[in-house]
Amino acid sequence: MSNTVLKIENVNKSFGGLLALNNINLDIERGTVHAIIGPNGAGKSTLLNVCIGLLKPDTGEVTFNGGEKIIGKKPHEINQIGLTRVFQTPEIFPDLTLLENVMLPALSKRDGSYKLSIFKMLSKETDIKNEAIESLKTISMDDRQDVIAGSLSRGDKRRLELAMCLVQKPELLLLDEPTAGMARHDTNQTIKLLKQIKEGGMTKIIIEHDMHVVFSVADKISVLARGKIIATGTPEEIRADPLVIEAYLGGAEL
Amino acid sequence: MMMNIFSKKSAPRLMLFFAIGVLTMPIWLDPVGANYPDLLQKFAIFGIFAIGYNILFGLTGYLSFGHAVFLGVGSYSAVWSFKLLTMNVIPAIIFSIIMAGLIAAAIGYVSLRRSGIYFSILTLAFAQMFYNLAYSVLTPITNGETGLQLTMHDPRIIDNALSRTVETGLPSTDFFGISMNGYSGFYFCAVMLIIAFYIYLKIFSSPFGMKLKGIKSNQKRMKYIGSDTRPYLIAAFVISGMFAGLAGSLMAVTDPLAGAERMQWTASGEVILMTILGGVGTLFGPLLGVGIIKYLENIFSAVNDSVLHSFYSFLPQWGENLLVTITAPFVGEGWHLTLGLLFMLTVIFLPGGVMEGFQKIKLYFQNRNKPDKSNNSSEESSNV
Ligand SMILES: Nc1ncnc2c1ncn2[C@@H]1O[C@H](COP(=O)(O)OP(=O)(O)O)[C@@H](O)[C@H]1O
Ligand SMILES: [Mg+2]
């Protein structure tokens, strides 16, 4: 198996006159946490949207695991081959309980795109239920299984969404600003969680504003500015890159 | 917690209580004047229609405005089975369910390309199309305005081959010799309701049902966790169409004729009213809605001034007259007014239907009995 989980080649995407992604080339290596940073409007979310089938690029190809072509596949197909995403605004099931929220992705992963399982009892899905409870434990919400998800705080909703994605044990997890809009306390808890799941060896792409978060969890960092990748490297290399300091970090000391 | 109803042990118990409740309807509906076969049958038939509708509307949130089409398809199919094959009801029911399922697959395939209001409009358009075609192009099948009826010279191939013919008049529908008139007709419908409810309960407590709830809550999330939502929606649509087809065929079983008015949009509207009034997405809500609406329609509508006078006769003459004058607009022909008011009050104060009212009463008593334990179960799951 190739060591590159995701290969992004010559991806271009424009909205009207605006070139949101300008000839992006990027390799994501297996087992790494790859952070994408850049100012607001740089095209970070757009890049993730292309990778999960939410947007079709104008040109270019994204290849998964050295063979599977992603462009043109439907969102559920892309998920079934092993990519799961945490959105910038949390996408959970607000009317369902926490346990149901986490059971659904586990069921969906096991059953595939479609399965007409009418004569099975949900209460007999003990494996799925145990997986779900395990996942709720990682975000310390296993004591609130029966709470309706819509009533959670914003920070808790985002962590719940993370648990929903983790329960699928994806080969590649994409996180879009998992700490955006969070209070300090919530951010710290999420960093703790991100570090904890880093040990699992799952490959991740993380978009993040908070430099503190980025430098504490990332193995590699790419800097995106106005649709172009201006640098890729280890945290130390990025910290030292004069181009990055000028373009993105505004000359500020890190 | 209410969720426990789906646990391994209590599902059979729930089924048992349900079956007993349905089969004893002639006993416990007697005191309220609803114990006659015609009405009892209606309760059972519309019960099947409404729980089937709830599989689509309650679980997926897709509001179909054209479900009466499947009632009509079910009725026509059943009458054709009576005419061509046999007066036995079993082939008729099977044929109706299959036909309704096929038509539902076709309508669902197209309508489910859209969601929200556009889906509703598409289903309404299909329903109106079928309704109008029944009077024009489809008259060879529907017999137009006269409606499809049994005649003396129907072929009835199977009955004739077994020389099960009647000498005089039109034959009546039967279940292997048991005539479907009167109470036996009701008991047959009741058994069908019990079977339908069993399947309905299975769907509610299955992974499939759970995924439908996921689609209702956040369809985007369902797609991005790997479920192809379209076939799930089509399956839910077809299943609920088949329930409606069964209901339609039972209408023909108890009264073997079929007319296009069964497919009119008002009939589709009625099942929406029933479901919302009782409680969308709850297990028993739609059945409650059926009970309330059919009771108002059949019993309340028969109340006239003289019944009211005797009801208030314990009052002095002027009081009796006053109350009769006040209440008269709400009964008899005015039952629609009562239903309208009831519906408005429910939607405004209990958006979760009558079931939400029960839930609130239950919570109130729970909190009163345990004042020390602050109860936040309103936030918790109680999807029954
Ligand atoms: N669906 C869209 N339609 C039009 N413009 C878009 C769309 N998505 C993003 N853009 C534009 O593309 C640019 C990049 O956006 P985005 O990828 O969201 O940036 P960020 O790096 O902050 O996540 C922005 O100028 C944004 O306005
Ligand atoms: Mg963004």
Image (cartoon, grey):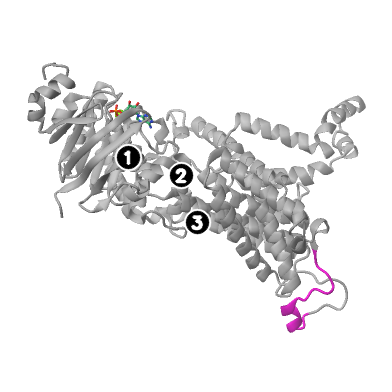
Q: Work out how far the residue at label 2 is from the one at label 1, CA to CA, in angstroms.
A: 27 Å
Where does the image place residue B21, in percent across and percent down from the top left? Answer: 63, 54
Q: Is residue B381 left or right of residue A179?
A: right
Q: Residue at x 65, y 45 (%)?
A: B124
Task: Kindly identify which residue carries mark 1.
Answer: A57
**SS for callout 3:** helix
Mark 3 and mark 2 in contact (Cβ < 8 Å)?
no
Decide if residue B214 is in sight here. yes
Where does the image place residue A87, in percent across and percent down from the top left? Answer: 33, 35
Q: Three-letter amino acid code at disc 3?
A: Lys
Q: Residue at x 39, y 49 (%)?
A: B227
Q: Work out how far the residue at label 2 is from the one at label 3, CA to CA, in angstroms.
A: 18 Å
Task: Kindly identify which residue carries mark 3.
Answer: B202
Secondary structure predominantly adopted by residues drawn in magenta: loop
| Chain bearing mark 3 | B
Q: Work out how far the residue at label 3 is from the one at label 1, CA to CA, in angstroms.
A: 43 Å
Q: Is residue B112 left or right of residue A143?
A: right
Of labels 3 and 1, the one closer to you: 1
Magenta region? B149-164
Q: Residue at x 11, y 17 (%)?
A: A253
Q: Three-letter amino acid code at disc 1?
A: Pro
Task: Kindly identify which residue carries mark 2.
Answer: B215
Indicate if the residue with disc 1 has its beta carbon within 8 Å of ligand 1: no
Q: Is residue B374 left or right of residue B79?
A: left
Toward which corner of the image does residue B373 lie, by quadrant? Answer: top left
**SS for callout 2:** helix
Mark 1 and mark 3 in contact (Cβ < 8 Å)?
no
